[in-house]
Image (cartoon, grey):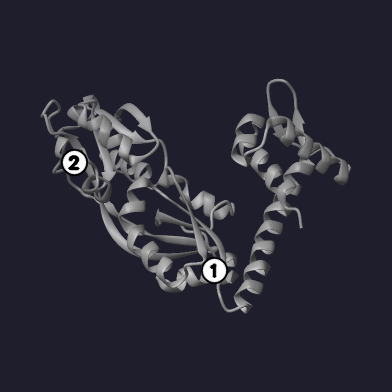
């Protein structure tokens, strides 16, 4: 079976950009365009609206996106099931996590998994941890490391592997003193995550104290927050595990601020229906 057209379609549906989608698929934009046109000709409908400035999914494209994802998931499941019957598990699993998680939480797990299942290839992708749950829900990644959200979908299985406090940090140089009053907090530049669990908890913290924070920067990735704080740009909030593994940990201080923010419950998550795959089930059972 040639599943490449479906993969090409999904890549373009995710990026809505021919250049980025073709790069992700390791093909030229013209080849991607021909692949999409061929798919549209087979279906007899347009999947994308496109002009010189933008690309968007049509109503038919939105419906086909769901079909394409389900088809690839089912293909992977039946393929893995047949491989499992041959006694030796072979294939690949995609794993998503932050850079910090890749060499802290994930290192020992992957080492043990590799020893037990040497024929299973792990494709490790790193990025913003706040995107992990969405990537699992959409089926783009098989397994991800994430902090457990306050409201976790019933479609996702979560296995806790550790707790990490969420802490306020300031520059070790002492350029910024620890805020105490509402007025001081309102004047203190804050460096915060753009989105995600940490951002939700710090926003709630400010709200309960009646403080309107002065946001200096909003960034993707906790490592960037540590870097900016170490340079004296402001006060930030990051998980303790990020600070412990940062090469800049000696250039920032943990601020003694109460009440403490709720700790991260860090764990691995997987879409429930993907556990039908013998490969993913083998990984999950190893935990």
Determine whether 213 is above or below 262 in the image. Answer: above
Determine whether 278 is above or below 92 in the image. Answer: below
Write down the quadrant of residue 254 in the picture.
Answer: top left
Q: Residue at x 38, y 44 (%)?
A: 200
Determine whether the residue tagged by mark 1 lies in a helix, strand or loop: helix
* Residue 177 x, y percent position in the rendering: 12, 30
Determine whether the residue tagged by mark 2 lies in a helix, strand or loop: helix
Left or right of 68 on screen, residue 219: left
Q: Which residue is mark 2?
A: 249
* Residue 206 x, y percent position in the rendering: 29, 38
Disc nearer the start of the sequence (1/2): 2
Q: Residue at x 36, y 41 (%)?
A: 199
Determine whether 243 is above or below 108 in the image. Answer: above
* Residue 22 x, y percent position in the rendering: 65, 35
User: Which-is-in-front pick, marks 1 and 2?
Assistant: 1
Which of the two residues, 210 or 27, is positioned nearer the viewer here?
Answer: 27
Quadrant in which the N terminus appears? bottom right
Q: Which residue is mark 1?
A: 279
* Residue 44 x, y percent position in the rendering: 89, 42
Left or right of 209 on screen, residue 129: right
Which of the two residues, 251 or 184, is positioned nearer the viewer here?
Answer: 251
Within 10 Å of disc 1 (Cα), the crowding (few <14, some 14-19, many 20+) is many
Within 10 Å of disc 2 (Cα), the crowding (few <14, some 14-19, many 20+) is some
């Amino acid at each position: 079976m040639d599943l490449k057209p479906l993969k090409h379609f999904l890549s373009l549906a995710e990026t809505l950009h021919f250049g980025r989608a073709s790069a992700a698929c390791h093909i030229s934009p013209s080849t991607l365009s021909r692949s999409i046109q061929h798919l549209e000709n087979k279906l007899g409908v347009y999947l994308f609206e496109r002009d010189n400035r933008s690309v968007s999914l049509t109503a038919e494209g939105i419906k086909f996106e769901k079909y394409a994802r389900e088809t690839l998931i089912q293909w992977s499941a039946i393929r893995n099931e047949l491989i499992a019957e041959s006694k030796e598990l072979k294939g690949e699993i995609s794993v998503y996590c932050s850079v910090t998680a890749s060499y802290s939480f994930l290192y020992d797990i992957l080492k043990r998994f590799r020893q037990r299942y040497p024929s299973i290839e792990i494709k490790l992708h790193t990025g913003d941890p706040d995107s992990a749950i969405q990537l699992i829900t959409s089926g783009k990644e098989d397994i991800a490391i994430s902090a457990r959200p306050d409201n976790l979908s019933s479609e996702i299985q979560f296995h806790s592997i550790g707790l990490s406090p969420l802490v306020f940090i300031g520059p070790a140089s002492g350029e910024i003193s620890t805020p105490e009053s509402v007025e001081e907090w309102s004047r203190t530049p804050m460096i915060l995550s753009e989105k995600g669990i940490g951002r939700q908890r710090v926003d709630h913290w400010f709200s309960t104290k009646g403080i309107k924070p002065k946001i200096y920067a909003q960034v993707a990735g906790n490592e960037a927050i540590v870097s900016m704080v170490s340079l004296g740009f402001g006060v930030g909030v990051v998980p303790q595990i990020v600070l412990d593994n940062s090469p800049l940990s000696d250039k920032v201080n943990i601020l003694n601020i109460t009440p403490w923010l709720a700790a991260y419950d860090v764990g691995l998550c997987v879409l429930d229906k993907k556990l039908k795959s013998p490969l993913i089930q083998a990984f999950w059972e190893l935990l």
